[in-house]
Amino acid sequence: MKVILSGGGSGEQTTELDTLFASLLNKSKSLLYIPLAIDNIKHPYPDCLKWLKSTFDNLGVTKYEVWAEQDLYKSKEISPEKFSGIYIGGGNTFYLMHQLKKSGFWNFLIKAIEKDIPIYGGSAGANILSKSLRTAKYYDKNWNQLKNLNGANLCKGYDLICHYKEEGREKVNKILSLEKLKLVLLTERSGLYNNGEKVVLIGKDPSTVINKNKEFILNPGEELH
């Protein structure tokens, strides 16, 4: 397993995460980019690809393939081993999961994880890889009225708060008063890496971890338990 869950930053904010991801890729194959969580009126998919390339071109990635909503159905006909890795961008968590499940891409993604294809999830892309989408209820609109909020559960049974800032702690406390959750608060400068044996914090910032009303700081390089 080679899975990165990013707090949602980009550029210099995520240098460590991006460099690690690029190092895991077989660069003779295309990197599959799934940008569909984003508002593609404000951010057309070709512009999203330019954004991705601005980071990964410099890290030796030369081949890309972008899938929009209608392309996801192709996942039923091909193997995930066609790709060097899969990058799932941020936006609306519920819309993203709805499209992945409806198209069958979710099964493709699980197969990719099982086959050790590197996966990078940023923000909404990270949420779907955590235990559940329950924190997203407080940040995103559930336009598709998604009822099954289970994620891939790839970070030790924790849910995530992405884009976390200290001024957002009051909202986190409200969420904890309403939901029984184990949480990792990821800033835009941090993320988690699951290599199949352990989950480690990567990046520039420490993260706050909340587990059964106990709170502690996880520093970069430390393992999540």
Image: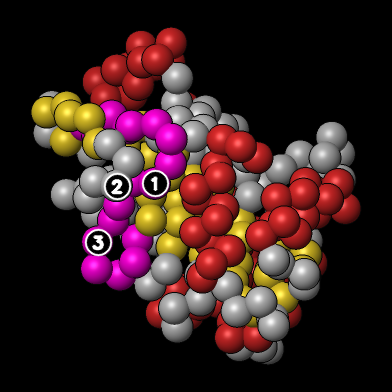
Disc 2 crowd, CA 10 A, few/some/many (<14, 14-19, 20+): some
- The location of residue 115, given as percent across then percent down, is 45, 83
User: What is the magenta range?
Assistant: 194-210
Q: What amino acid is at disc 2?
A: Gly
Question: Which residue does the image show at 75% across and 59% down from the upper left?
Answer: 57
The residue that label 3 is drawn on is: 198
Front of the two marks 1 and 3: 1
Q: Which residue is nearer to you in this view: 191 or 148?
A: 191
Give yes or no for residue 197 being in the magenta stretch. yes
Question: Which residue does the image show at 12% across and 33% down from the upper left?
Answer: 212
Q: Which residue is nearer to you in this view: 187 or 125?
A: 187
The residue that label 1 is drawn on is: 202
The residue that label 2 is drawn on is: 221
Q: Can you tell which quarter of the image residue 140 is in?
A: top right
Q: What is the secondary structure assignment of the residue under circle 1?
A: strand
Disc 1 crowd, CA 10 A, few/some/many (<14, 14-19, 20+): many
Q: What amino acid is at disc 1?
A: Ile
If you read the primary sequence from the N terminus, does the residue marked by circle 3 or circle 2 appear first?
3
Give yes or no for residue 99 being in the magenta stretch. no
Is the C-beta separation of discs 1 and 3 under 8 Å?
no
Q: Can you tell which quarter of the image residue 177 is in?
A: top left
Horizontal side, residue 179 vs residue 6: left or right: left
Quick one: quadrant of the N terminus?
bottom left
Q: What amino acid is at disc 3?
A: Lys
